[in-house]
Image (cartoon, rainbow, N blue to C red):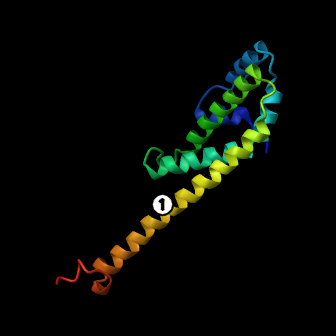
Amino acid sequence: MKIDLGNILKTLGLPVGLVVVFSAVLALFGVSLDTVLATAASLVGLWLVIGVVIDVLKLFGVVNDGTSGKWSAALNLVALAGIAVTLGLKPTFDFPAFDLQLITVAKFATLLLGYIAQMVGTKAVHTVTTQALGVRAFSFSASGA
């Protein structure tokens, strides 16, 4: 997985010159952009969590159709900044162990999101069956008794 910081900034509508500023700030703290990008590219769990966060925000109406790319680009940029700060402040941070924890969080969140979708879907099918189709045998309250 190759991270194209220029493309992320373009998606956000930010100038590509920001990459130069970002690189200069990293150099000031003794962290290379290549190191940040290499670390970021290895974090599968982080990207999974970002995807799940966007899906949850969609579920609650925060993210509208057609804006997911901008949300993804923004969250990925925040993640890159977080990785850069972590590398600058604590170069020995164990990113692989952290990533494994994020994978577990993403799995659990995906399972929970799937469960919620299943419950909403089941209720919708029940509602259609009892009310729209008029099959009263499935509902004691709709029987009119």
Total labels: the figure holds: 1
Quarter of the picture holding the N terminus: top right
Q: Is residue 65 visible?
A: no
Q: Residue 87, located in which quarter of the rendered image? A: top right
74 vs 103, left or right, is left
Residue 56 coordinates in the image, percent (x, y) = 51, 49
Q: Which residue occupies the extreme top position in the image?
A: 28
Residue 114 coordinates in the image, percent (x, y) = 54, 61
105 vs 3, left or right, is left
Q: Which residue occupies the extreme left position in the image?
A: 145
Q: Nearer the viewer, residue 51 or 105?
A: 105
- At label 1, which amino acid type do we have? Ile
What residue lies at 17% left-to-right and 82% top-to-bottom? 144
What residue lies at 45% left-to-right and 44% top-to-bottom? 62
Q: Is residue 17 visible?
A: yes
What residue lies at 55% left-to-right and 46% top-to-bottom? 54
Instruction: Identify the residue position indicated by label 1 in the image.
Output: 116
Q: In the rendered view, tell whether residue 121 sits above or below residue 46.
A: below
Q: Residue 82, located in which quarter of the rendered image? A: top right
How crowded pointer 1 is (Cα within 10 Å; few <14, some 14-19, many 20+) is rated as few
What residue lies at 69% left-to-right and 49% top-to-bottom? 103
Q: Nearer the viewer, residue 101 or 10?
A: 101
Quarter of the picture holding the C terminus: bottom left
67 vs 43, left or right, is left
